Image (spheres, rainbow, N blue to C red):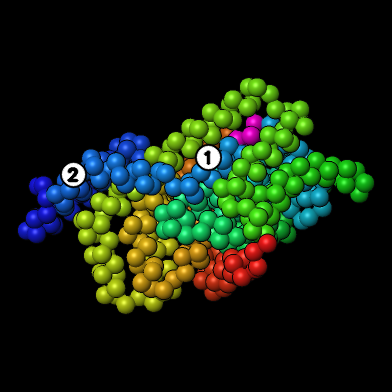
Amino acid sequence: MTGFDRDAVALKIGIFLFVLFFLLGTGLWVGLALFGVAYIGMIGFTTRDPGNAMIITVWTGASSWTLTALPLFIWMGEILYRTRLSEDMFKGLAPWMARIPGGLLHTNVVGCTVFAAVSGSSAATLTTVGKMSIPELRARGYPEFMTIGTLAGAATLGLMIPPSLTLIVYGVTVRESITKLFMAGVLPGLVLAGMFMLYIVAWYFLKPHQRPEPEAKIGFVAALKNSTLLIPVIALVFVVIGSMYTGYATATEAAAFGVVGALVLALLQGSLSRENFIESLLGATRTSAMIALILMGAAFLSLSMGFTGLPRALAAWIATFDLSPIALIAALTVFYIIIGMFLDGISAVVLTMAIIEPMIRAAGIDLVWFGIFIVVVVEMAQITPPIGFNLFVLQGMTKHDITYIARTAIPMFAIMVVMVAILVAFPGLATWLPEQLMSAPTP
């Protein structure tokens, strides 16, 4: 069973796939499962020393300068989550959202959009905005179905709107510019947020009997005064994203600006305590370590996959169907929705890229555009049972049954399917801004 033996290839591939699904199915940490599968592949398909190959591959993957942006963006989101900055954001948005058909339900979408621009994590976005909005919307009589559903869908914007942890992982995996990917996510993220808000407006007019009592009118001056609470968070968004767009900073440098900015704002606001600081640091360390372990395992698995010949065989098999790029994207949409039911987004990306990337390059599909497509379908995975991470977070926050929460998210899932179609029909939505960025003269 060791070394390459042409007569035993089918048997070894069968064992390789069995170990893959067995380890992932047992609930073992994804990173460790990937290491175990890769080790089996190295033993079965090459005479190269697996330990030596693992050390070199893991070090090469983990020492990437691009990856330093990951823990920094996670830490920035943790600081905002654990201080009063996120609460002030909700207070500043509420007076304006109450004027739109659908009322304060729009704070779920707009709040998630704003927080996504300084967080990068779907879970952090959902937890932060949910803790603020759910009690407020319940107290004002908004339907539970809409409150939970819109929050479940809108929180996935944390994966698309820069800084996005999923885009960082994707960029590192396919060796694409993180800054270009971040810029590519801006317009599709805003379009998707607009589609979520249109859904709320449609509910308002189609289900008038579900409307709560109108909000008490607040004067323009009072609303403007409340809006000043948004200034710190919006300033932080402009510093992080603006520094990348103008070319003054790389993604990693922008992340460092974001951390320093979040600490300074929390300090000036008086909500940064020793306990908050330590908790944010430990939370960022735990999340970063988990993602780093997955990426290390994925790097080793990619090497092992190359020796098995599975990526080449699968690409050759799909090539026999002579699929057009659009048909390929349709097939991959279904594929990612299915695996997204069982894996979290980052794991789904790193686990499949070794196989998918050669197919995408051969089909002539733009890797920046495909990164945004990946994020949309991974967003769907966040709200699909049985393993939809956002569903679990909401279950813990609301105490509702998981099936009820999944039903509330169905309309948001449908909107994301429409978003995939829009990306296919209008690819410039994802590629226009990065092209403008790259063509602009460097200051």
Q: SS for tag 2?
A: loop
Q: Magenta residues, as a range?
A: 78-82
Q: In the rendered view of the protein, which quadrant contains the C terminus?
A: bottom right
Q: Which mark is residue 337?
A: none
Of 101 and 121, the residue lying toward us: 121
The residue where tag 1 is placed is 71
Of 117 and 97, the residue lying toward us: 117
Tell me the amino acid under the disc marked 2.
Answer: Asp
In the rendered structure, the answer to whether residue 335 lies left or right of residue 313 reads right
Q: Quadrant of residue 359?
A: bottom left
The residue where tag 2 is placed is 49
Where's residue 154, x and y in %?
61, 50
Rounded to the nearest angstrom, the CA distance separating label 2 from label 1 is: 32 Å
In the rendered structure, the answer to whether residue 321 lies left or right of residue 258 reads left
Q: Quadrant of residue 101?
A: bottom right
Label 2: how many Cα within 10 Å (few below 14, some 14–19, many 20+)? few
Where's residue 416, x and y in %?
54, 60
Position of residue 41 relative to residue 356, above or below, is above
Q: SS for tag 1?
A: helix
The answer to whether the residues at label 2 and label 1 have Cβ atoms under 8 Å apart is no
Where's residue 353, x and y in %?
37, 57
Where's residue 439, x and y in %?
61, 70
Residue name at image x 23 percent, y 40 percent: 51
Q: Residue furthest front?
A: 443
On the question of residue 47 being in view, the answer is yes
Q: Is residue 267 magenta?
A: no
Tell me the amino acid under the disc marked 1.
Answer: Pro
